[in-house]
Image (cartoon, helix red, strand yellow):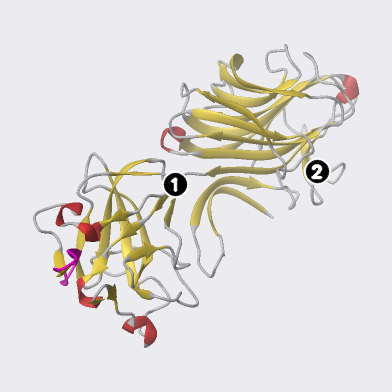
Amino acid sequence: MKKIGIIYFVLLWAAFSVAQTIYLQDDFEDGDISNWHQIPDSNWVASTDGAISGNYSLKHALSDTAGSSHITVPLDSIDVSHKNMKWQFNLKNGNFDPDAARKFWVYLMVHDTTHVNGYAVGVNLSGETDSLSLWRLTGSVADTMLITTSFDWGPNNLVGIEVTRDSSGVWELKYDPNGNFDNPINAGAAKDDYYTAANYFGLSFYFKRENAGYLWLDDVLVEDASRVNVAVKGFLQGAFASDTMRTDLADQGFLVNNQPYDASPWNYNGDEIVKHFPDGVVDWIQVQLRTSTDSASTVATRAAFVRKDGMITDLDGYSPVSFSDIADGNYYIVLRHRNHLAIMTANPVALSAETTVYDFSTAQTQAYGTNPMVEVDTTNHVYAMPTGDS
């Protein structure tokens, strides 16, 4: 199966879905590489000969000649400065030992295909080492080695390679010397944010007569691996009873299976859907993230569940609410409900893949504004979202 460009896939797990952005995914199984650009033409094919996995791999197509071959595919002009990117692929050479004249590398991200500025991973980019290494390229020249490994690439090696870059410019290189990605070795990390334009992904191969045709690429994945998890607690005044909330809507079958915030004033077109509601669900609730510099600027929205204990969860009923394609940082968290007034954190909250619970219910000052919540338990001083039209 082959998917090129920006696609959104659905991860089905525990009867719910989470969206994540994939910019490039190609296993070459359809045998079609027409959207890849070759320099020179007709140097590469999708071939069954020596395929790495499945029936097809991208393979160098020449024989008995020396030269260089290059192939690229567009990445939809990604600005990586606000993303956590991941590149993953399998790379295999034939029966030759790389050297200064027989070398290859993968362009992770470059701004154009002629005067190359960007980053690449491979061997002998500068003609000096057979060790798998990550480099910065300027003007098509490998000018700065960021990370090198102890892996000395030899003949007939199949290597699974994974490279990540976080939103601050920290790169990390992992490799599996047996191919695939099931036993990766971490080669270390380095910071370099000199280039941020990811316009193309590609492969270069310099070869002699005897090793022409003996390079393969497969299982290519380029995705935005950014994710923050939001663990937040907030009660609804209308459902509050003693120290918990009623679950009447779920118990009596009044909750809809699709998220209900697609109408005005929410106008949210998310595709959250469940087949069954987890135990303890009170209702659907909308969670927004807004920038730390402008509390009116929304950067992400999810529909989630509010449980009877006040915890806001993802659709499995227990996990924090997960936001894909959002980099670590400080955000205002907003809770919106169909018949309660919205509340927002008093200050921006530091968010990442790790979670710390933000509890609106403990004090009026947990929410932004003057008396934004109602005290529903005057003995224990528990606060909740006020009833009203949102």
Q: Where is residue 38 in the image (x, y as percent from the top left)?
A: 69, 32
Q: Which quadrant would residue 158 be assigned to in this image?
A: top right
Location of the N terminus (image quadrant): bottom right
Question: In the image, 246: left or right of 100?
Answer: left
Considering only order in the chain, which callout, 2 or 1, is on the residue closer to the N terminus?
Answer: 2
Q: Say which residue appears at 37% left-offset and 80% top-offset.
A: 255
Is 226 in the magenta? no
Residue highlighted by disc 2: 52
Which stretch did the figure color magenta? 378-390
Q: What residue type is labelled 2?
A: Ile
Q: Which of the two residues, 286 or 234, is positioned nearer the viewer here?
A: 234
Q: Which amino acid does label 1 sit on?
A: Glu
* Total numbered labels: 2
For residue 179, what is the image quadrant?
top right
Identity of the residue drawn at 86% across and 31% down: 156
**Residue at the image position 33 percent from the left and 69 percent from the top:** 309
Residue closer to the observer: 27 or 187 = 187
Residues 198 and 18: in front is 18
